[in-house]
Structure formats: C-alpha cells, structure tokens
Image (tube, helix red, strand yellow):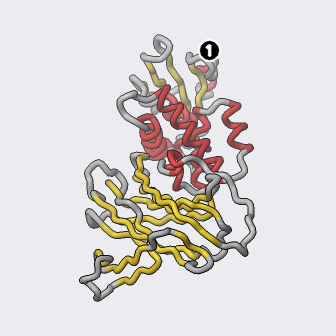
Amino acid sequence: MSISDIELASKMIQGSENTNSVFYKNTYEVVPIPNVVFGKTQPALFFYTELYNLQSPLLKSDVIKMNQMIYNSKGKLIKEKSKNLSRNSDSRVEVGSYILSDYPTDSYTLVIVLVDSSSNTGITTAKKFFVYNPDIQVTDTFEVSTTAVLSSTFGSMSEEELDDLFDKSEYLASKSEIEKYERLSNVDGKREFMFEFWKTKDETLGSTQNKNEFYRTYLQRIELANQRFTSMGKQGWKTDRGRIYLIYGEPTEIERYPNELETRPYEIWHYNEIEGGVFFIFADLTGFSDYTLINSTKRGELRDDNWSRRIIIR
C-alpha cells in the first residue's frame, strides 16, 4: 500500500460542480492555503490525501487502520484519531478537518499512518503547518512515542488491547520487564514498551530475513493454544500446556496415554532441539482435561523425578 502527500486546504467542497477548477480532484474542490497558517483568522484546517494499492496481496488484514496525529513543535501529541478502512477497492480518497481555534501559537505536524495489523507494517506521511492564536495560553500535553512506534501495530492499540497482549506475553518477559510495564501509567508509554519488547524478541528469537516474524508466530501460537487446550472455561494460553506451547512451540514428538487402566491420562512432550533434548509431562489430575505440568527436564521448569506417583489411580 502507499499514500500520497497530504494537501492542506482552507476550504473543501465535496461534490463540487466546478470541474474546470485547477483545485478540483476526485469530486472535491480543494482550495489550498499557501502560507499554511491557521488559527485566529482561519480556524478550520482541511486535509486531502489519496491511498493506493489497498488490495495488494502483501496485506494480511481485512481492514487497514488509519491513525491521524497532530504534534506540536516539541514532539508532543495534541490530537489523535483513528478509524478502520475497508479494502473493497484498490484506491480511495481520505479527507478530514480540524478546528484549531483553541490551539496555542506554534508550529505543528499532521501525521497520517496506515497500519496493516496482521503483518505489523505501516506507512507514514506528514505535513507541517502553523497556528497563530495570540490569545490562547500554552498548556501542557503528554509525551508520545516515535513515528516508528505509531506506524507499528502497537501504535493503533488501545490501552486495554495492550494490557491484554502483555498478559499473554508475560511468559517471555523478565521480572524487570514485568515490573517496568506495571509502572507505566499511560497508553503511549505502553505502546513504546510493547514496540521495543517485541523488536528485541524478534531480533533474538526470530529470523533476520523476516521482520516481525516471531511476533506473528507468537500470535499464531496463542490462537492455536486456545483451540487445542481450552478447558473448563480457562483459555488455552493460560493452561500449563498452553504456556509451554507459547514459549517453545510445537514439540518434536508427543506421547499420549489417555486410557491407561492404572493411571490418570497423561502426555509427554519431547523437544529434541532444546538443551540436547528435554521433555515435559502433563497429567489430567482432575478428570476435566485440564492437564497440569508435573515434571520436566528443562532447566528452570518444574522437576519431580517421582512424578509417576501423582498419576496412579488408587
């Protein structure tokens, strides 16, 4: 996908019949403002941009998320909007407006970001403008992350979505990373944290050829864990088998013993590529298909060499 430069305007007429105007394009008459100064005498800012290649096979999401942000000269976020765009056509026009009558005098930048959430990729375009409002006092605003963060899939996530994703990512997080995330008090800090967290994980656990490979793999593991291991109202990723699957992926081999006469159902998962070969033993101790980890040879995991006594039916 691609996006054109942003055109700023003092007036925009939709469905204009003035088709001979040099400012006419795609049913809009976009009247430019050469000095790009808004505020007291020109409170309304209009923008026009064109989007292309929305039906590219490289895009994975059914919809594209469009984020609009306005920054002041200090790089602080003043305004943010977002919406989902359908991909039912290969190109489209996007227009919008902002009322700037209460913005203090300063230079600002309008940034538009298109994000394909499934592949965690995005593109950005930006346009600088000025506001002159001598009667408006400067007020403090909150810090934002970099454009790279905002153009990623995390840049369009709500705080609830970020918290949910981090809950599912804690299996990979260190104690200090968990403590750091829990101290974050605003959505922008959480977006930046998740961007850096997954960037680091992708660099250490993913492929150098495929950007965001491990992040996408992990999301797929969450989905599969929920399909395979959900039991008694507990989502699959929260179970012991789900945790091991999320961290280590598909086992090399699984031995299943669901119907032994003298033992409860249990499974042995083998990972031949980890530490020269390790295994995990899970048992259905309750009879409700909620398999619990009872022994493993993986360093740092539960070790109980007498695990067999726990599954004997007495």
The answer to whether residue 309 is visible is no
The answer to whether residue 281 is visible is yes
Mark 1 surroundings: few (<14), some (14-19) or many (≥20) residues within 10 A: few
Q: Is residue 271 rendered to the left or right of residue 91?
A: right
The residue drawn where x is 34% and y is 65% is 50
Q: Tell me where residue 307 appears, x and y as whole percent.
A: 61, 20
In the rendered view, would you say 282 is above or below 170?
above
Describe the element under mark 1 as helix, strand or loop: loop
Q: Tell me where residue 25 appears, x and y as whole percent.
A: 29, 75
Of the pair 80 and 310, the residue shown nearer to us: 80
Q: Tell me where residue 151 appears, x and y as whole percent.
A: 48, 50
Q: Tell me where residue 302 appears, x and y as whole percent.
A: 63, 22
The residue drawn where x is 32% and y is 54% is 1
Of the pair 176 and 113, the residue shown nearer to us: 113
Of the pair 2 and 127, the residue shown nearer to us: 127
The residue drawn where x is 47% and y is 17% is 274
In the rendered view, would you say 250 is above or below 10?
above
Which residue is most to the top? 276
* Residue indicated by mark 1: 305
The residue drawn where x is 72% and y is 75% is 135
In the rendered view, would you say 112 is above or below 216?
below
Specify the amino acid type for callout 1: Asp
Of the 4 image quadrants, the one containing the C terminus is top right
